[in-house]
Amino acid sequence: MTNSASLADAPRIERDAAVNPVTGRTAGSVQGILLLIGSCLPVLGAVLLAPILPTLTGVFASVPGSEALVPLIVTIPALMIALIAPFAGAIVDRVGRKRLLVVALIVYAVLGTAPLYLDSLPGIVLSRVGVGITEAAIMTCCTTLLADYFVGARRDKYFGLQTVVTSLAATAFFVIGGALGANGWRTPFWLYAVSLLLVVPVALLIWQPRMQKTGADRAKLPPIPWRALALPLIVSLFGGLMFYSLIVELPYVLAGLGVTEVSTIGAVTAAASLATAIGAILFRWIARFQARRLLPLALGLGGVGLVIVWFAPSIPVAIIGAVITSFGNGILLPTLLTWAVSGLAFEQRGRGTGLWTGFLFFGQFACPLVLLALQAPLGSLPAALGALGIASLVIAVALAFGLARSTASPDSASAPVPAAH
């Protein structure tokens, strides 16, 4: 596989066409929308149940170890995505994208709604482990199919929209989770059944991008280009820390500045989500500047915003910092995804996407732990966020100089490589 050609040098048909090279079928907005909706499902595990955590703590207070087990109801799916997504990517490359996606959507609903009838806290946590596994499969399949169906400017558009819809979905699910939780702690789990509404449309309108190889040929999948993929994966791990830092911690920062009204916290969180969406929407038009320019920009904005939050003397200044960081994060995620997967051949794309998803979600899972570890010596949460911001600025500068000088820059890894037929 050759990664030496830049995206600008790729043939126009490779950059702009959306016709599958084997089947000749053209993916359109219907397929794109279905895959974007599917990409929102893993967000449920992160935010839907956060508003009911205090209630769950009270319900299971008498259960030994509940102090550790109750938070796992929210965090364990992200850890499972981080651990399982690379394996899901290997399955995707061997057995096909569509088959795994349909099965995962069904199992997701079964396991996601399991707490409706489970009374055991360990049993609920175990069901959440299963939810995380299905989320890994769904996210990997949806992202891989977006990369399969679309190339060039259309791929940039959908990668940006994926960040937009998941960011807005996170805000919506947080509000919905709180509203449903007012009717009982089990009620929010009904929302996991929504995946069943996607099963039939996915079965009818999503197709496997190419004929599967025979069993003998499947064992001969081309190896992952680790040398080209290693740096994107490492930066994506840090990107996961950056992206989820304010999603997780912004309410606590506002509380430290004296904000106690839930409506105010919700409004500020919504403003940050909107900034993320705007950054992701813009990616479609700025993607031509490629990762070697966009990564330093996105990480630089994220770092500046967190430093502003650190030193913010008032709520309006903290909001400005949060908006700047969120805008940078909106650019960051689609840039990282494009950098990581667009240089992969078809037979490598599932595994590459799975690895990227795993590294990103491990960053999400580790985010509160890293900030807690920083908070102890630095003395406050804003200082911990500021330290993360400084690290982001340092990485931005290193990437700006290192990638510009390297012959293996993101530009050289950004050309879509036609799959061998």
Image (cartoon, rainbow, N blue to C red):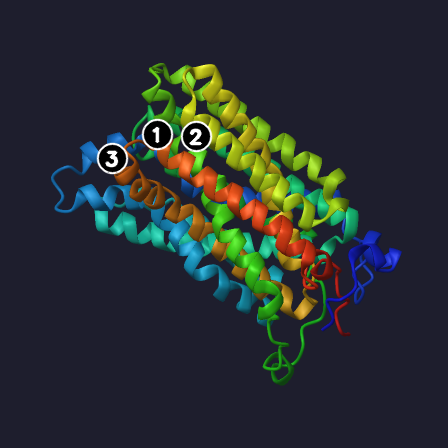
Q: Determine whether the residue tagged by mark 2 lies in a helix, strand or loop.
A: helix
The amino acid type found where label 2 is placed reads Phe
Q: CA distance from mark 2 to mark 3?
A: 16 Å
Report the amino acid beneath label 3.
Answer: Leu
The residue carrying mark 3 is 56
Q: Which residue is mark 1?
A: 51
Q: Are the two marked residues, 3 and 1, in contact with CB atoms closer than 8 angstroms?
A: no
Q: Position of residue 30 (x, y in %)?
A: 72, 44
Q: Residue 102: in sight, yes or no?
A: no
Q: Which quadrant would residue 352 be assigned to in this image?
A: bottom right
Answer with mark 2 or mark 3, whichever residue precedes in sequence.
Answer: 3
At 43% from the left and 46% from the top, the residue drawn is 364
Dot 3: what SS? helix
Q: Which residue is mark 2?
A: 174
Residue shown at the point (87%, 60%) measured from the top left? 11
Res 336 seen here? yes
Q: Position of residue 53 (x, y in %)?
A: 29, 34
Q: Judge left or right: residue 264 versus residue 97.
A: left
Rounded to the nearest angstrom, the CA distance separating label 3 from label 1 is 10 Å
Q: State left or right for residue 402 relative to residue 376.
A: right
Distance from the alpha carbon under mark 2 to that under mark 1: 7 Å
User: Residue 353: which quarter of the image?
Assistant: bottom right
Q: Earlier in the sequence, mark 2 or mark 1?
A: 1
| Helix, strand or loop status at disc 1 | helix
Question: Do labels 2 and 1 touch, CB within 8 Å?
Answer: yes
